[in-house]
Image (cartoon, helix red, strand yellow):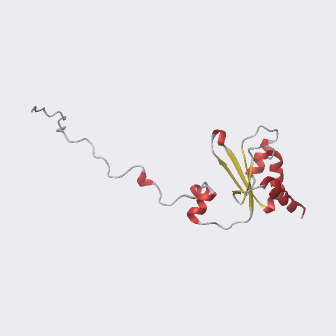
Amino acid sequence: MKCYANTTPAMNPEPPKHRPLERFWPYAELPEQPTDAELAALDPDVYEALFGAKPRPFSITIVFPTLDVPEFDRALALARASAEYRETGAGAAFRHRARFWSGDALQLRELFAIVGASDDTDVLIDDRPLPYAKELWLPLVWFLIFR
């Protein structure tokens, strides 16, 4: 049977020059409650799952990418003037989200006239993709313009 010499390095006989703090940086400085900006940035489905549905009026949301159309600057101005405007994603998945209430039917129609021709434009009814949203729901909302 062979005996091997201890190959572990010897401990440093000098005491350390500094003592580490007894806290877990950066986690100790995080707030326990989410900020208003973080709550506003939550996906509507996640917000509803965490906090329950918040009461709000009927809404239609237009979700569209950056398009190469002549009036895109006007489309962005209309989207930013909507009841709620957010930018989500990055790169090829970057989208503009503009929420309109039923009283904003004219602005909704103007925005959709610019970005609606794109196949990448989505229409959400109360934050949900519904069948025939472009073909049925939007024309029904256009009737609100003439009341």
Is residue 69 positioned above or below 55 on the image? above
Location of residue 92 by image quarter:
top right
- Residue occupying the far front of the picture: 1
Q: Is 12 above or below relative to 138?
A: above
Q: Position of residue 86 (x, y in %)?
A: 67, 51
Specify whether 11 is left or right of 60.
left
Picture coordinates of residue 126, whole percent (x, y): 71, 60
Tell whether 41 sits left or right of 10: right
Q: Position of residue 18 (x, y in %)?
A: 27, 43
Q: Residue 87's spot in the image, x, y percent?
A: 66, 48
Q: Is residue 13 above or below residue 103?
A: above
Instruction: Spot the residue most to the bottom.
Output: 55
> As displayed, is residue 60 above or below residue 3?
below
Q: In which quarter of the image is the C terminus?
A: bottom right
Identity of the residue drawn at 79% across and 62% down: 102
Residue at x-position 47% and y-position 57%: 31
* Viewer-proximal residue among 29 and 146: 146
- Residue ID at (17%, 33%): 7
Residue at figure coordinates x 84%, y 60% from the top left: 140
Q: How many labels does the image show?
A: 0
For residue 70, what is the image quadrant?
A: top right
Rendered image quadrant of residue 39: bottom right
- From the viewer's side, name the closer residue of 140 and 18: 140
Position of the N terminus, as image quadrant, is top left
The answer to whether residue 35 is left or right of residue 99 is: left
